Image (cartoon, rainbow, N blue to C red):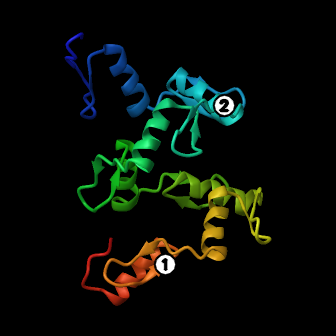
Amino acid sequence: MHLGIKNYECNHCDYQTSEKAALKKHIDNIHLGIKNYKCNICDYKTAQKSNLQNHLDNVHLGIKNHKCSHCDYETVRKSSLKEHIGVIHLGIKNYKCNLCKYKSAQKSKLQYHFDIVHLGIKNHKCKYCSYVTKQSGNLTKHVNDVHDNIKKFNCSHCDYQASLKSSVTRHINEVHLRKTDHKCSQCDYKAVRKHFVTRHMKKIHPDIEST
């Protein structure tokens, strides 16, 4: 154990550890989905007590003790700050998809990408209708927009409202700032959305593999 020998192996995946308790926690959390720690304010559940405390601090109390020294980013987790610095400021993305050019700083995000993009898995289902989606954020937006009609985020330039802050940010960038951050690798074409570039590539450069 002191030499870092990992004698305990998961029989469901390639996870290894030097502690039996850590292996049990891994199996309960990842493969069995056991979540014994429950938030007394909302429906959040987790397999680890520390995650529950982080949830309470972040979501309900708004406590974010870990701050980035390069920008205004704040987070409740030290690991999240480390990941933020690596991805945003250092550009570190060690996990690569073997089917496309996607890269990520997290193994879980690579798996999420693989499930959504290459396998087409849609795990998030609306409890009010037949709507299903690949991303939890899309489901939240759907429920808020369609069923609850909740639009708590407002555009500072016009009357536009949305259920997600990211939607307002995208709206401002596209409509008011006209940011064209997505560029074609073959010509000077630029667009406000990535799928516009993808559509452009298929139409104008059909013989070139789209990125």
Task: Give the residue type that dot 2 points to.
Answer: Ile
Q: Residue at coordinates 28% horizontally, 55% vertically from top-left?
A: 97
Q: Residue 45: where, in percent of width, then height? A: 58, 31
Q: Could you tell me the amino acid type at mark 1?
A: Ala
Estimate the x, y position of residue 105 in percent, counting from the top left: 37, 45
C-alpha span from label 1 to label 2: 37 Å
Count up the numbered dots: 2
> At 53% across and 31% down in the image, what residue appears?
77
Q: Can you say whether 198 is above or below 131 in the image?
A: below
- Give the structural element (helix, strand or loop) at label 2: loop
Q: Residues within 10 Å of mark 1 (few under 14, many from 20)?
A: some
Q: Quadrant of residue 209?
A: bottom left
Identity of the residue furthest to the top in this view: 2
How crowded pointer 2 is (Cα within 10 Å; few <14, some 14-19, many 20+) is rated as some
Q: Please tell me in which quadrant of the rendered image residue 125 appears.
A: bottom right
Q: Find disc 2 in the rendering and name its residue.
A: 63
Give the x, y percent position of residue 208: 26, 81
Instruction: Report which quarter residue 14 is drawn in.
Output: top left
